[in-house]
Amino acid sequence: MDSPDIETPPPPPPEVTPKRRSVRTWVLLGAVAIGVGVMVLVFAGRFGMDVTFVESPLIGQRAPSLEMEYIDGSGTLRTDDLLGEVVVMNFWASWCPPCRDEHPALIETSKRYEGTGVRFVGVLHEDTPENGAKFLDELGWGENYEYVVGDGTSAAIEYGIYGIPETFVIDANGIIAVKITGIATSASLDAAIQTARTSSGTP
């Protein structure tokens, strides 16, 4: 006569010791920290929370040759005409809060570098000249500044603009030396201009 099948209970789960529990907790916290860090990097660049000199395939490349109309309709600016000067090219819009935050630093820095071979160019991005002019009437027009309209040109495409403000600093030889993502400050602009001067051998 066959012996009856006897079901044996499953073995008890392994005991979670305090040491195992601690390791598991630290692993979880580490994963959360990494995720938060990635989000901060992404959104900082997108919404101007921080200023960062960033790697870009455009660094070391010749700046695109562009022709853009002035905001006030007084003519056009050919970027090739700026060769021999360091150019700070800032992409901005009236609807962009970080652009409003960085505007005083751009104005102040452009004034300090007037007559030193450094030219500032503000490229209005996805906005109308009327709104851009109202923004500048409210916050101030730079004295050492060219304000042009990027829409209708290849400016945004050539520079790979995906979120403003973005600032490119071009050396006197027409080579892109620095890209700043986020809100530019006087300190970051000074550092970027110095980098451009060094790369082109200008004082």
Image (cartoon, rainbow, N blue to C red):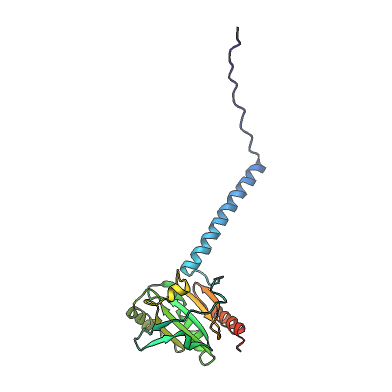
Q: Position of residue 60 (x, y in %)?
A: 57, 77
Along the line of sight, which residue is nearer the eye, 33 or 63? 63
Q: Residue furthest top?
A: 1
Along the line of sight, which residue is nearer the eye, 58 or 16? 58
Q: Is residue 145 above or below residue 158?
A: below
The structure residue drawn at horizontal position 58% and vertical position 80%, both measured from the top left corner, is 191
Q: Is residue 10 above or below residue 33?
A: above
Q: Is residue 194 left or right of residue 127?
A: right
Quarter holding the N terminus?
Answer: top right
Q: Position of residue 69 (x, y in %)?
A: 38, 84
Q: Is residue 200 left or right of residue 122?
A: right
Q: Position of residue 125 (x, y in %)?
A: 40, 75
Q: Residue furthest left?
A: 130
Q: Quadrant of residue 71?
A: bottom left
Q: Position of residue 161 (x, y in %)?
A: 45, 71
Along the line of sight, which residue is nearer the eye, 129 or 39? 129
